[in-house]
Image: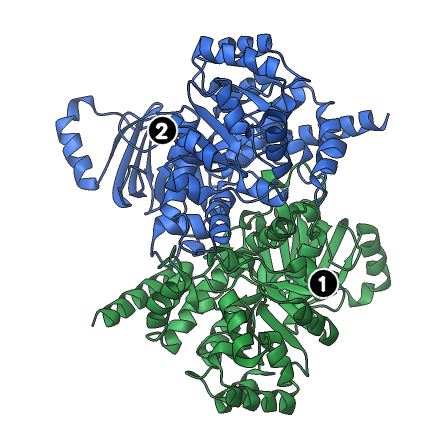
Chain colours: A green, B blue
Amino acid sequence: MNIRFYNARILTMEEGKKVFEGELWVKKEKIIFVGTKEEAGKYFETHASEMLVWDEEIDCNKNLLMPTFKNAHTHSAMTLMRSRADDLPLNDWLNKQIFPVEAKMTGEDIYYLTKLAILEYVSGGMSACFDMYLTPYTVADACREAGFRCVQVSAINNFSQTPELVEEWFNNINGKDPFNSYIIGCHAEYTCSEELLLKLSDLIHKYKSPFFSHMSETKAEHDGCIERHGMTPVQYFDSLGMFDFGGGGYHLVWADDKDIEIMADKGLYAVSNPGSNTKLASGIAPISDFVKRGVPVALGTDGPASNNSLDMFKEMFLVTGLAKLRDMDASSVDAINVLKMATVNGAHAMGLKDCDILAEGKLADIVMIDMTQPEMHPINNIEKNLVYAGCKQDVKMTMIHGDIKYRDGIFNIGVSPDELYDRAEMIKARIDKELEQ
Amino acid sequence: MNIRFYNARILTMEEGKKVFEGELWVKKEKIIFVGTKEEAGKYFETHASEMLVWDEEIDCNKNLLMPTFKNAHTHSAMTLMRSRADDLPLNDWLNKQIFPVEAKMTGEDIYYLTKLAILEYVSGGMSACFDMYLTPYTVADACREAGFRCVQVSAINNFSQTPELVEEWFNNINGKDPFNSYIIGCHAEYTCSEELLLKLSDLIHKYKSPFFSHMSETKAEHDGCIERHGMTPVQYFDSLGMFDFGGGGYHLVWADDKDIEIMADKGLYAVSNPGSNTKLASGIAPISDFVKRGVPVALGTDGPASNNSLDMFKEMFLVTGLAKLRDMDASSVDAINVLKMATVNGAHAMGLKDCDILAEGKLADIVMIDMTQPEMHPINNIEKNLVYAGCKQDVKMTMIHGDIKYRDGIFNIGVSPDELYDRAEMIKARIDKELEQ
């Protein structure tokens, strides 16, 4: 499809570039022009012979086009456990509620439950997720069919998955379709033996893969690692050469100064999950310190059992709000930087270098923000207002890879919401029955 | 209008009552029946002669009916300053940005800007606000015309308003229409002389009015009061007899054990504003302590310049999430209690005793929650899911006093959103010009 968006406000997220009024043209999966109406006219004159026939011309009515949000840490298929077990101490929640259900989930369950998450992603303006879960092939199937980008990371630990499987997934998922990729990682330091991590380190060096893992999510995990290895998780992984080709960590709530120094030196990404860290009482990550030391911060929702929504607007408000509370300083972590975390930094953390900003030659991953919603008015500072007052209701359209996946409340991911809701209820009923036996 | 809602899920918010499937009937401004389909059939048989002609019968398609949210602390007309000045230290924000603009605002400005806030309130499922601002008559006009409930509280301080004006407003606003009422209060301890507060105390005793004010919002304010009076704000106001007819405080971030004891003993309400307290780095209120000591907590958004949205879903997530972080305990402040804060407790704090739950004889202030949104699935625990995963997008309809004010994105408050957006821009342009001179 070739689509012309005109009469739009546009926020390209190029460094330092403000919102302007203009046009954006999409040819198949790519952006071929972004600029003012005047620039569009000139472009047309000089490129008249190559001009496209538009499949659709969309009057944006001054609504805002901007890059999609990137969900840089999640476990999509945990939709099943959303609001199943809340307000519990962390250990009870994980051991008594989450693990027993996960033990009963099949690859097919995960396929449908991932698609359920994708509904929520696209209705909230997201085009990509950085997913860690149990059955990489069925997750990849779900994302490819839905036309949603997914970077998977190994969930390997002492109890599930093997280095051989990780290598197989790495080779069979990367480079096979435009939507899926795979990065080597592990669940967490406290669930992996050193022997296992050294095998992963070999794979990392063989394939030159970045490495990601849960790190320092809770104080107990962080302190436990120091007890076990005399080092924090970041330092321990670094000592095993896991970061030799980049990567980063999820959560990093308890990262210390030395961790941040290592991350800055190696160009690692700190993926923060403030919604989950809040609901599970894990703590407040040192976001200001990451920012001051030049560690790029990306944002993730974490899984829907620990959040319980998959909503980047919630994460954007929280990441700066919690930093302000932690620092007791209302000027901490400027909202403009937060918008970058949710878009550009997320894309870069996930290795999606062509989906970061709106510019000629980039992939067409575009959100249209509904400027007719009351929380958008008056128009003082659109960028900051998205962070402080924006919500999922303000997403009017989500385009991924040149296809409109969500528009005015209607989904277009190849399967109806009702079918996915029914599937989720059937899976729930089956697993509940199995657990009773 | 007489309206029958059928095929609905219903959450009445009566203590201990779970979600059930059934019908809800509205006659003019009141609820005349709530119950299961079977109960509706029996009711019809025994009341056949009095049966209504329905103006509309609404198939709810299993969407959820519940009581509206009550915004128990706000400054609605501060919509003007939304996202005008963020990421600033508190004093710079207030003194250099907010106060100069407020000094230029007219009663007519406030009338339009309050209506702008009402758009956001009704699209987020709210039916009432507890408003403190500058021109009570024009605020009351805006709310009456929009059909939105507003309890105003005096903003009096040493620099604006007088006890005589407060008494005039009290007499001229209370009892005049079904939407507006007025409670005696003041801006804050630190902006009021003891002489002024004693005059207000006389009014409180003359009219048997509850008393509300900002209290212990920031540590500086809380500590300053102890320095000035040897007592915290709650204790100081109490020593002047301000709470002899009930009431409570806004914020109370720094309330201490003795404050909480006084509040419990006197049946006072703690109105928490977690969004504002987060963004302005004021701190985290001791919500668990209020709950444990039996002080009812209500929720407010505070003004849109300090939040920057007017969204009860945001406040619900934050009030329990921040309590969990403060207590380092994921089981702190159960979500069921949070839903009560946002509905029943808010209504009671504001003196709106007929708008608290869905029951026969109560006023018809009703939200319909869209259960077809992805974040509502699977259906594990609807009540907790509203708190942890709900968002403004899930509001399908808001009814106030028997009138549908918002439905499927369409507003019905007597003026178009576009007119209000244009008014806000004109007001902004005029004030900016005045400030330049």
The three-letter amino acid code for the residue at tag 1 is: Ile
Q: Quadrant of residue B214?
A: top right
Q: Amino acid at mark 2?
A: Ala
Q: Residue B343: x percent and y percent?
A: 40, 36
In the image, A265: left or right of B27?
Answer: right
Is the Cβ of the residue at disc 1 closer than 8 Å to that at disc 2? no
The answer to whether residue B402 is seen in the rendering is no
Is any part of residue A195 visible from this angle? Answer: yes
Across and down, in percent, residue B296 comes to 40, 34
Relative to residue A303, is residue A133 depicted above or below? below
Does dot 1 land on a helix, a strand or a loop?
Answer: loop
Where does label 1 land, which residue? A357
Circle 2 residue: B364
Q: Residue at x 50, y 21 (%)?
A: B239
**In the displayed image of the protein, which residue is found farthest to the front?**
B230
Q: Chain of mark 1?
A: A
Q: Residues within 10 Å of mark 1 (few under 14, many from 20)?
A: many
